[in-house]
């Protein structure tokens, strides 16, 4: 699902011309907003950075930011009856 941007549509159509099985394109003006809102925290944290340096560093940093964001939203699965605090969940992964 992409927004109503013409550039995205043109790029996907160019990719589909080269593929055996085309990517199904679904355009919706507002459906993409949920995805963009979820990345708002990443954008806020990465904007002041000077850059990642290389792809490996970008992957590690963005993965950590996503993990902390998921813990804060309560999306991390945990064992047991009681839900541990966000700090305890983070420390359990770090140790």
Image: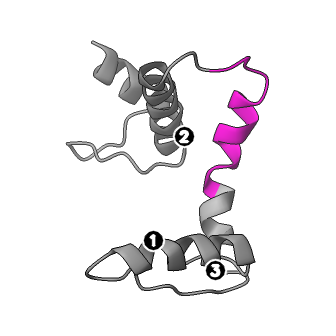
Within 10 angstroms of label 1, few (less than 14), some, or many (20 or more) residues?
few
Which of pointers 3 and 2 lies earlier in the amino acid sequence? 3
Judged by depth in the image, the label closer to the viewer, 3 or 2, is 3
Quickly name the residue at label 3: 31
Return the x and y of residue 47 as percentages of the image width and height: 76, 30
Q: Which mark is residue 91?
A: none
Q: Which mark is residue 15?
A: 1
Give the Cα separation between the discs numbered 3 and 2: 21 Å
Q: Quadrant of the C terminus?
A: top left
Dot 2: what SS? helix
| Residue contact between numbered discs 2 and 1, judged by CB atoms under 8 Å | no
Point out the stretch of residues depicted in magenta.
38-51
Considering depth in this image, is 19 or 3 the residue closer to the camera?
19
Give the Cα separation between the discs numbered 2 and 1: 32 Å
Which of pointers 3 and 1 lies earlier in the amino acid sequence? 1
Considering depth in this image, is 55 or 11 the residue closer to the camera?
11
Check if residue 9 falls in the magenta segment.
Answer: no
**Can residue 5 be seen by looking at this rendering?**
no
Judged by depth in the image, the label closer to the viewer, 3 or 1, is 1
Return the x and y of residue 72 as percentages of the image width and height: 54, 40
Quickly name the residue at label 2: 69
Within 10 angstroms of label 3, few (less than 14), some, or many (20 or more) residues?
few
Q: Residue at x 69, y 29 (%)?
A: 46
Return the x and y of residue 94 as percentages of the image width and height: 33, 16
Dot 3: what SS? loop
Among all residues in the image, which is located at the extreme front? 18
Among all residues in the image, which is located at the extreme left? 79
Q: Is 80 on the left-hand or right-hand side of 26? A: left
What sort of colour scheme is used for the picture? one colour
Within 10 angstroms of label 2, few (less than 14), some, or many (20 or more) residues?
some
Among all residues in the image, which is located at the extreme top? 95
């Amino acid at each position: 699902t992409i927004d109503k941007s013409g550039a995205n549509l043109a790029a996907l159509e160019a990719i589909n011309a080269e593929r055996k099985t085309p990517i199904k394109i679904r355009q919706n003006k507002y459906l993409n907003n949920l995805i963009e809102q979820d990345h708002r925290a990443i954008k806020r944290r990465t904007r002041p950075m000077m850059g990642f340096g290389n792809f490996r560093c970008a992957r590690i940093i963005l993965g950590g930011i996503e993990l902390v964001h998921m813990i804060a939203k309560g999306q991390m699965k945990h064992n047991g009856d009681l839900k541990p605090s966000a700090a305890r969940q983070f420390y359990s992964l770090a140790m």
